[in-house]
Amino acid sequence: MYSPLYFDYNATTPCLKEVVDSMLPYFNQDFGNPSSSHHPYGWLAKSAVEDATVAIANNLGVTPSSLVYTSGATESINMVLIGVARKMQSKGNHIITTKAEHKAVLDTCAFLEENGFEVTYLDVDSKGLISTEMLSDMLRPETILVSILYANNETGTIQPLDEISKLTHENGSLLFSDTTQALGKLDLTKVFQFVDFACFSAHKVYGPKGIGLVFIKDNEGGNGLPSFIHGGGQQKKQRGGTLNTPLIIGFSKAIELAHDNLNTEIQRLETLRNKLEKGLLKIDLSISNSAPPRRLSNTVHISFPYVDGTNLLTALSRQIAVSNGSACNSASVEPSHVLTAMGIERSLAYASLRLSIGRFTTANEIDKAIEIITNEVAKQREQNILWERRK
Ligand code: PLP
């Protein structure tokens, strides 16, 4: 089995050994159900979950009661959008989001539209940023929720949540931000002041797959959501079902490790990202689709004109794992909806690569990636008659 270089950390990350080790006892030794309140097996599991939740809350700078466990960010997004819509429908039926959201938001919004809600999709500019003037114009008295992705999973573009929060709250609406890609890559302290709801997923931060979180700012008070999964009454009845002790422990460990050296790691990744981007931009006519200065430190997104995108990805797949859109959308033959929302024409959107680096990426791998992609783009262009005739 060959192992290509891994440049797809925004799709998922390997689960760290420390994380796996922290989970193991809770599979077979301390396996109790945290809801079993009549014996020590249950007490132990309950106390492990409580300790893990307090640790997550301390690392994020939020209260433990603001956190609800889910199966991942997709479920968290469904829970918030559908929950707020159901809860607030007597106030209004209007939701605002953007055309460059993750499909988990867009598909949930489409579901809400089928059920009588009205959704406004804000345009983004050529770097993926929304216009706050446009947001201000679209807000109405009946707008119950604004849902805006904080850090884009494809381009790394970071939206101005401070201004978005001000406008949204002045209008009396609630703000949700999909913060899935920001955890472990940005300091989120301020973000929790700006938003009413946020979401996370452990597998994006070197934790296990199958566990996520919803952050609900005023969970004890006004913002608590209606039951999303019924049964058992767990998690303040918001999401029933036996709590998954091992995955919660693993998620907590992953967040602790991510926060241990967050600033040093951001700096290290930024240096590597700049080296990668600089190297790839030496390829003739290549264009960066990321927006300086507010962008993720690990993401590079570049288009290569005169290249067939599908052939490029196929040729690269044995040597380097990259993506040309959202991984969750990889079965689709449509170009990335994020790039088309940014006004990039279809053939160029196909001929684009997202490279996302992470904890195990080295400078040597960056050099190799630049070399592999440079050679492959040249090969693809040699076979393209339009490349020859471009002048
Ligand atoms: N939101 C964003 C921005 C993402 O990048 C992803 C994963 O690709 C998701 C949501 C969905 O996350 P999960 O795989 O935990 O459902």
Image (cartoon, rainbow, N blue to C red):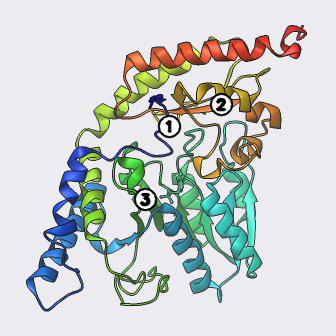
| Crowding near the residue tagged with mark 2, few <14, some 14–19, many ≥20 C-alpha atoms within 10 Å | many
Q: Is residue 245 above or below residue 124?
A: below
- Left or right of 310? Residue 262 is left
Q: What element does badge 1 sit on? A: loop
Gap between marks 3 and 2 measured at Cα: 29 Å
Give residue 323's quadrant in the image.
Answer: top right
Q: Which residue is mark 1?
A: 8
Q: Which residue is mark 2?
A: 313
Could you tell me residue 327's position as x and y percent? Answer: 58, 47
Q: Quick one: label 3 or label 2, which is nearer the N terminus?
A: 3
Give me the residue at 42% from left, 83% from top.
238
Gap between marks 1 and 3 measured at Cα: 18 Å
The amino acid beneath tag 2 is: Leu
Give me the residue at 42% from left, 27% from top.
270
Q: What element does badge 2 sit on? A: helix
Camera-near label (1 vs 3) is 1
Give residue 200's quadrant in the image.
Answer: bottom left
Q: Which residue is mark 3?
A: 200
Could you tell me residue 9's position as x and y percent? Answer: 46, 39
Gap between marks 1 and 2 measured at Cα: 13 Å
* Along the viewing direction, whichever of 366 and 80 lies nearer the viewer: 366
